[in-house]
Structures are given as C-alpha cells and as structure tokens.
Amino acid sequence: IGLSNDSKYSIINECLPYVSKRLLTDKSERTGGALSTFIFGPDKAKEDRIIDYDRVEQLVSGFGDYTTSASGELLGKDASRTETIENVATQVLDLLATEEETPLQQIFIEQLAKIITSSTRSAWSDIRERSGVLPSGRTVLGTLVDPLGIFRSSPIVRVNELDERTVETTRNLLQLLSDTNSNGESTVDISALDSSEIIEITSIIARKLFERRSGVIQTSNRLAVQLLQLTADRLEKGGERDIVVVPSSDPIENASDGRIHEEGNKKEKSTSERLESARQILAAIDQ
C-alpha cells in the first residue's frame, strides 16, 4: 500500500522516529545494548570506541521527527518560543540529568569525557606548535612550562590517533547541529530572541536545573570519575612506550648485571599498584 502511493516509501524510515525515541528513553539493559550497537556498530565492545557519525545523524533525525510529531498539539496552540525552548530543555534534562545512571547517560558521559580530554590535548599541542621552535628542537611554550622536558612525551599531553578521530567526530557532530538549525529543522531561531525572552528562558532553565540538582550533581560526579579513569588508563597503557633509552658509548654503563632490570620491574609493579589503588578510590567515589 505504501509503495503504491510513494515509490520511495520505506517502512524502516517510517518506524525510525519511534525506534529512536525508544532507544534514547528506555532504561532497560536490553535496550541499552541495542543503543550501543546502533551508535557504535561493530566497535561497541572496544575500549577506544567512538560514536559513528552517520548512525548518530540517523538517531538525532529520527528523534527530532518524533519530538516534532509528539508536540503537534502544542504547536497547534500557538506556543511561544519560550514554551518551545522550555519543552526542549525539559526533554534534554530528563534524558541526561538523572540520578540513576541510564544507558544513554553512560554513553553520553563516556563520549563527553573523551571529547574533553582529546580536545584539550589537541588544543595544547596546537598552541605549543604555534609558539615557535627553539634551536634545541623544543617549542617555546613547552620549554617555559616544562623546562626539564619531563612531560614532553607523556601520554597525558601527547596526541594520538584516537584523539584525532575523537576531534574529527566532534567537528562532524557540531556541523550536524549547525546544519539542523540552518535547514530550518529547529522550531526556534535562538538568534531572534529578544532580551526579555532570554531573561525568561534563563530563569526557566535555572529553575529546572535547581529542581533536578540531585541528578545534575550525580551526572557531574560521574563525568569527573570518567575523566580521572581515562587519565589513569592512558598513563598505564602509555607508560612503557614513553620510556626512551639513550645508548651510551661507555662499555661499563652498557654492561648489564641484572640489578637494573630488577629495580625496573619493581618500579613497574609499584606503578601498577598505584594505578590499582587509584581505581579503587574512583570506584568508591562513584558509589
């Protein structure tokens, strides 16, 4: 029947708005697994997983269509721009600022933490390179901040392939939001708001944040824990690769008596114990 009326009819596209809404709002573990599969695809089980832009675009588009359809009665009542924005703010807070961790919030916090850390490293690397290079080969800013070069190759500040992918995905997501607004899919033009509407909207959002302060605090704590966890994992995985061995021309210094290696093993063991202790502290904070 659908194809007889429209040659481009697709039952999948017709169901996408409801499916998107169900994936984003359902708190069950089963739906959470489906959400991970939809967003990450075959990489959902990997630690360095990054959301698939094309899949997120479908999800956002479907949820937007569902929201537009569900709010039809509100639009029919000639709702003001303030009421429309209040509606959107309520939906966002209901999805993300929850006291109990949901599958969507877990993915959101995980990806937001990766975006924050990767963007920070990328920005720092860019600023450092723009400061100029000294005859020694080091950048001016890097020398001023770290004269001894202790953190020169530290995984905390070094940009890797995952950071580059994360930054690129972030740019695509920002472009998606920009395109959504420019194509007229947004029901409200933020730039057209007058001062009284801005004041009213600010007051409404502040009130809603206060009403959900417990959920906002819990969400912020989870984000802080995730940021610390990412830093600890990066240090543990990148620690051994950051060790640089400078060969010496002195045969005595090159001689190995086994004692140096033993001390190195003890140091690695001590480092692992500290990281494990840090994880335990993070787990206690999360609880």
Image (cartoon, rainbow, N blue to C red):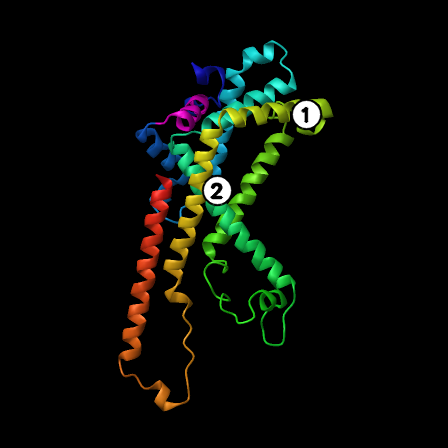
Q: Earlier in the sequence, mark 2 or mark 1?
A: 2
Q: Nearer the viewer, residue 179 or 71?
A: 71
Corner quadrant of residue 122 = bottom right
**Residue 51 appearing in the image:** no
Q: Does 163 sit above or below residue 68?
A: below
Indicate whether residue 17 is drawn in magenta: yes
Apparent side of residue 274 relative to residue 211 in the rendered image (left or right): left
Judged from the image, the secondary structure of the residue bearing numbered disc 2 is: helix
| Residue 232 higher or lower than 136, as above or below | above
Q: Quadrant of the N terminus?
A: top left
Q: If the image is split into quadrants, where does the C terminus sit? A: top left
Magenta region, mostly helix, strand or loop? helix
x and y, in percent, of residue 180 in the image: 59, 31
Circle number at residue 199: 1
Q: Residue at x 65, y 67 (%)?
A: 132
Under mark 2, the amino acid is: Leu
**Position of residue 167 measured from the top left corner of the image (x, y, whole percent):** 53, 49
Left or right of residue 263, residue 167 in this image: right
- Residue type at mark 1? Ile
Residue at numbered disc 2: 112
**First to last magenta residue range:** 13-27
